[in-house]
Image (cartoon, rainbow, N blue to C red):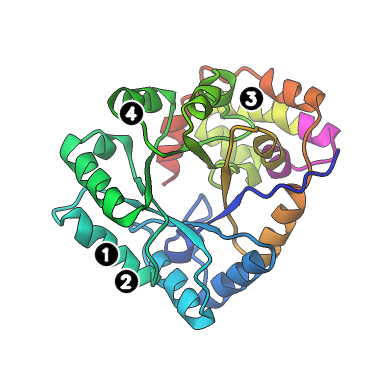
Amino acid sequence: MKKNSSNKISIGSANFGLNYTVDKIKLKKDEVFKILDLAKKNNIYSIDTAQSYGKSEKTIGEYIKLNFYKKFEITTKIKIKKSKIDKILNDSQKKLSVMPRNVLVHNSEDYLNDKFREDLIEFQKRKKIMIGVSVYDDGEILKVLKKHTPDIIQLPLNAINNQSHSSGLLRLLKEQKIIIQARSVFFQGLFFKKESIIKRKSVLLYKSLIKLKQIANNNNLTLPELSLIFVNSISEINKIVIGVNSANELKNNINIVKKIASKKLINEIMDINCKKINFTKIIQNLN
């Protein structure tokens, strides 16, 4: 495998404030600070958070204040509330101690609400931020594009759930100059779990993962490593949101993204037929 110096990592922070992924882990503040220290040291400036991630925004803001460090490019996600957009985002700014660079609507249904989206666009004009939406599948993306072209789309993408890539949709988004952020690279921690646990979630998913795991083994990789290398090799992806449970995990991922897969390896991954798997349902059931 060849080395690749590009760095697309964005620190996923759901577990900074919530019991997140299949392991339901919430990090202590000192571990969060170690992760952000290591990110800063490795020129990783992107952080992905959300108002619904418990105290995640507040913890990130405390780090920024403590270190007098405002270079982080923060993406936060919001939902429709009774409050006006100004109040919603001023609340985020207060907690983070900086205005988020990017604001994503947490689901496509809220983004497709004309009043909410138009208010967000007006806020964007005044504050010079980028706006977008977090989606689950290709169908949601197409619905969004019919209404409005966002600056950013965040979508699930990994070595098993890669339909947005295989369908050519990522290429279409890139042609429209949309920034693409990939999340669920480790399938919200499912790639780290025993096969028996995966089989209980979905027999179809289990059968496909067995094939994928064999490909990983043949290349002296773990399943999570294979998935990260695969996603990082996709040129259309601007950022890869990675959640970690420790600074050591982040260090390992930093080393992994320096590698890219051969064309042969990418083709082997893409040849696994996963069209019958309902990824949206599986992901929603994990939360």
Q: Which residues are magenta?
A: 215-227
Label 1 neighbourhood size at 10 Å, few (<14), some (14-19), many (20+)?
A: some
Q: Is residue 54 left or right of residue 3?
A: left
Amino acid type of the residue tagged 2 in the rendering: Lys
Residue beneath disc 3: 207
Tell me the SS state at disc 2. helix
Tell me the SS state at disc 1. helix
Q: Is residue 262 left or right of residue 133?
A: right
Q: Position of residue 56 (x, y in %)?
A: 42, 65
Residue beneath disc 1: 90
Q: Is residue 222 magenta?
A: yes
Q: CA distance from mark 3 to mark 4?
A: 32 Å
Q: Is residue 3 left or right of residue 49?
A: right
Q: CA distance from mark 4 to mark 1?
A: 26 Å
Q: Earlier in the sequence, mark 3 or mark 4?
A: 4
Q: Earlier in the sequence, mark 3 or mark 2?
A: 2
Labels 3, 4: front one: 4
Q: Is residue 236 left or right of residue 211?
A: left
Q: Residue furthest bottom?
A: 66
Which quadrant of the figure contains the N terminus?
Answer: top right
Amino acid type of the residue tagged 4 in the rendering: Val
Q: CA distance from mark 4 to mark 2?
A: 30 Å
The numbered disc on residue 144 is: 4
